[in-house]
Amino acid sequence: MLLNLDRAREQMERHNVDALVAARAENILYLTDCEGHLTTGLFGQPSEFYPSYFAILPRRDDIPPTFICPPSMFGYLVDQPTWIPDVRMWGEAASSVPSLDQLQGDSRQFAEALLKGRERGLPGPAQTALVTALQEMGLAQARLGVDDPILLDRLKGTELGGAGLVEAYE
């Protein structure tokens, strides 16, 4: 695991942050150990940054860390599983997965991951999925450290506007 969980929680305690919200590729990699998202959201002007992957690391142990991603990520998770216990899919997928008894190996693992992701699916687009997940995690009014200033600004115009949103790239 790349993440130094003890240090991350110490920093959250020190800065009075209830959870970290990562949207930047390098921070998602650090929090999840999964690099499948690294080719998305890295190019273009900063004003064009529309993340479709998020990692949420709560300070409290009783709220599970969560990885939010589109269905296309689930193929990567077969080869590069994450330690994150709660992987949630946003958008539509897995509507035509073959019967699991017809599959084996990686194909079966991929289908199982898609079906599990669909069970706890989130509405799209990505930002809506993030807001919904934070609400479901009980973090809608929490002090959230967000690693991207553009996303931070966009979240202020959502249901999270009452949360203490702070910049937390470092």
Image (tube, rainbow, N blue to C red):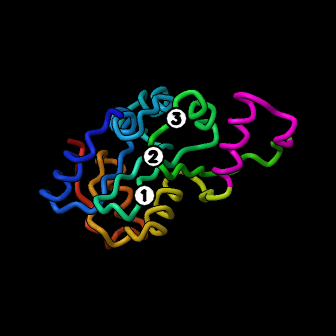
Classed neighbour count for the residue bearing mark 3: other residues with Cα under 10 Å, few (<14), some (14–19), many (≥20): few
Residue linked to disc 1: 64
Residue linked to disc 2: 84
Which of the two labelled residues, at mark 2 and mark 1, occupies the earlier sequence position?
1
Q: Residue at x 36, y 41 (%)?
A: 31
Asked if residue 120 lies in the magenta stretch, the reply is: no
Residue linked to disc 3: 81
Which of the two labelled residues, at mark 1 and mark 3, occupies the earlier sequence position?
1
- Image side of residue 127 versus residue 30, left or right: right
| CB within 8 Å, label 2 to label 1 | yes
- Image side of residue 108 versus residue 99, left or right: left
Mark linked to residue 113: none
Q: CA distance from mark 3 to mark 2?
A: 9 Å
Q: Residue at x 34, y 69 (%)?
A: 161
Name the amino acid, label 3.
Pro
Would you place residue 108 above or below residue 130 in this image?
Answer: above
Q: Position of residue 137 (x, y in %)?
A: 44, 66
| CB within 8 Å, label 1 to label 3 | no
Would you place residue 22 above or below residue 133 in this image?
Answer: above
Callout 2: SS: loop
Question: Where does the magenta region start and end?
Answer: 99-118
Q: CA distance from mark 1 to mark 3?
A: 16 Å
Classed neighbour count for the residue bearing mark 1: other residues with Cα under 10 Å, few (<14), some (14–19), many (≥20): some
Callout 3: SS: loop
Name the amino acid, label 2.
Ile
**Viewer-proximal residue, 46 or 25?**
25
Q: CA distance from mark 2 to mark 1?
A: 8 Å
> In what quadrant of the picture does the N terminus appear?
top left
Asked if residue 112 lies in the magenta stretch, the reply is: yes
Q: Main secondary structure of the magenta part?
A: helix
